[in-house]
Image (cartoon, rainbow, N blue to C red):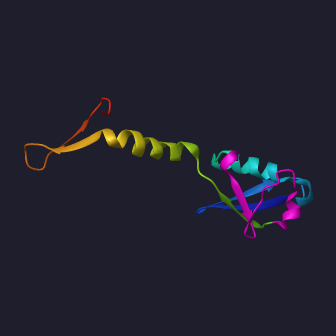
């Protein structure tokens, strides 16, 4: 059994490959496990070992100098999270206007719907 520790931001996960050795596991298998765990799309998922990005999906993990119980850093963003902020700031934010109401301490938010001139 081989255990590889993945660090993604402040989160850590131990990924286990049962009945396997590092010379049998390809990078694409590790990337697929990271995708299942984190939800980061494979296109944006980057794995870093000893300061270098591992790119060759067909290469065996032993080629990258990874040892059992070694730590690999993962980088990537979950799409839904980044798309939410993109939508909020570029589409919704320009249509929001804030006005103070007549009474003291009241505030109303109105959404303007229409076309930009």
Q: Residue at x 64, y 49 (%)?
A: 38
The part of the image, by quadrant, that contains residue 98 is: top left
Q: Is residue 89 magenta?
A: no
Q: Nearer the viewer, residue 93 or 29?
A: 93
- Span shown in magenta: 42-68
Residue located farthest toward the right when viewing the structure as drawn: 23
Give the image location of residue 112, x and y in percent.
27, 34
Give the image location of residue 7, x and y in percent.
66, 62
Give the image location of residue 70, x and y in percent.
77, 67
Q: Is residue 45 magenta?
A: yes
Q: Is residue 104 left or right of residue 11?
A: left
Q: Is residue 42 left or right of residue 16?
A: left
Q: Residue at x 58, y 63 (%)?
A: 10
Residue located farthest toward the top when viewing the structure as drawn: 114
Q: Nearer the viewer, residue 15 or 59?
A: 59
Q: Residue at x 52, y 47 (%)?
A: 82
Q: Nearer the viewer, residue 68 or 90?
A: 90
Give the image location of residue 58, x and y in percent.
87, 50
Q: Quadrant of the C terminus?
A: top left
């Amino acid at each position: 059994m081989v255990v590889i520790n993945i660090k993604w931001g402040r989160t850590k996960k131990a990924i286990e490959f049962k009945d396997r050795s590092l010379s049998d596991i390809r990078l694409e298998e590790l990337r697929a496990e990271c995708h299942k765990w984190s939800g980061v799309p494979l296109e944006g998922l980057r794995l870093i070992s000893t300061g270098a990005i591992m790119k060759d999906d067909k290469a065996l993990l032993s080629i990258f100098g990874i040892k059992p119980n070694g730590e690999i850093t993962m980088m990537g963003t979950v799409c839904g999270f980044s798309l939410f902020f993109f939508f909020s700031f570029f589409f919704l934010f320009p249509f929001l206007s804030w006005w103070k109401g007549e009474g003291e301490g009241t505030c109303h938010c109105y959404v303007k719907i229409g076309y930009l001139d």
